[in-house]
Image (tube, coloured by chain):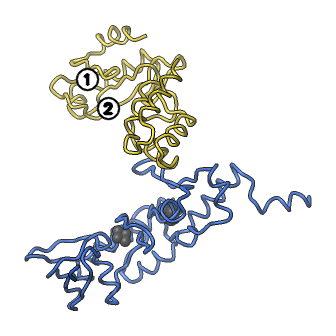
Chain colours: A blue, B yellow
Amino acid sequence: MTDIVLNIDGKEVTAAAGATVLDAARQAGIHIPTLCHFEKLEAYGGCRLCMVESESRGKTSYVVSCLYPVENGLVVRTRSAKVDKIRRLIIEELMAHAPEAPELVALAREYGADKDRFEKEPIYCILCGLCERYCAEVKQKNAIGFVGNGPEREISFVPEIAAKECNDCKECFPLCPTSYLQAAFVLVESLTFAPAAAEPVAAQG
Amino acid sequence: MSEQKIDGIIEKYRGKPGALIHALTEIQHELHWLPREVMEKVAEALEVPFSLVRQIVSFYKTFSLTPKGRHEVHVCTGMTCHLRGAAKLMAKVAEITGLKPGETDTDSRFTLERGSCLGSCSIGPELIVDGKHYGRMTPDKVEDVLKRYE
Ligand code: SF4
Ligand code: FES
């Protein structure tokens, strides 16, 4: 397949057809911030933080770089006043949910986001779906999934599967940008099945 | 009897993950809710993860995780119906059924829901029972309509 040549931040970048703008940028060592992207998983396009400015045939638009395929002659700007403004808003909205998440705190510093801009609704999950998709795509266990819709949407373990699979895995924990996932796990564990660590303690007592 | 019917629906879609919403809709129609065991059966037969079945069921308002009444009563509270007196109609329906929107009575006869613009503004205010539309409904006509549903 023929390679595609595009321009990212003034730099000529070559990428394979079918690659995304994010792939191309990373290959060229250009950083675009992401929250819901993980190399081992299908692109998701959930957080919108990777939004960049793109110019194609004289038309400027704002596209999600983790989904947008490269095309010949595409001009991409990974930072601009408007891109920064979009990212700042996304960060501020997410911080209403998870004000102390380290990744968000770092991003807020970089983009000048105000963590108190929106009234707090600390649910700690930013719905990036990393845990759910990792469990489904990589582990193929489907021990965790979303329930509800709109403002009620949340992550929830399937207790029967979690009791069997999670203790020996927990590979999704480090992926979570907040501490919500671990909290949700501890909750389902204490409500629906005996935590593995609890047994020796019980035997002693 | 009803269980056979449910199994029949599930069998019809066995091995067809793409038919998940169809299967759930038919079962919801039959049982007026989706018990967990049924969701598990659906997951297994259609070869989709249980977590996905749960996600779909909790996402769409059509589906219910708790038992609903035999008859679903919707009072449209969209803008047009509102201007045409939906609030009074709702109050009357609530009085007759003893329910608030979202509730089901102990005999499982009615579930009352609010609808937001059900698409028939020209005949508002509108009452819908089990999918049947009653236009230009008024508080004094509504009792007769509800009486038809046992
Ligand atoms: S629990 Fe964590 S990893 Fe899972 S969706 Fe929420 S923020 Fe993302
Ligand atoms: S990284 Fe692209 S939308 Fe989240």
Q: Amino acid at mark 1?
A: Glu
Residue B115, label in figure: 2
Looking at the image, residue B67 lies above or below residue B36: above
Q: Amino acid at mark 2?
A: Gly
- Secondary structure state at the residue bearing disc 1: loop
Q: Nearer the viewer, residue A193 or B81?
A: A193
Tag 2 subunit = B
Q: Position of residue A133 (x, y in %)?
A: 47, 62
Looking at the image, residue B72 lies above or below residue A14: above
Which quadrant does the C terminus of chain A fall into?
bottom right
Q: Position of residue B138 (x, y in %)?
A: 26, 16
Residue B1, label in figure: none
Q: Which quadrant holds residue A28?
A: bottom left
Residue beneath the point at 31% across and 78% down: A22
Q: Nearer the viewer, residue A163 or B140?
A: A163
Q: Position of residue A139 (x, y in %)?
A: 54, 63
How many marks do you count on the picture? 2
Disc 1 Cβ-to-ligand 1 distance below 8 Å: no
Residue beneath the point at 17% across and 71% down: A61
The answer to whether tags 2 and 1 share a subunit is yes
- Residue A122 in view in this figure: no
Which residue is the site of mark 1? B126
Query: What is the C-alpha distance between the residues marked 2 and 1?
Result: 9 Å
Q: Which quadrant holds residue A179?
A: bottom right
Tag 1 subunit = B
Looking at the image, residue A171 lies above or below residue A147: below
Q: Do the residues bearing badges 2 and 1 touch, measured as CB atoms within 8 Å?
A: yes
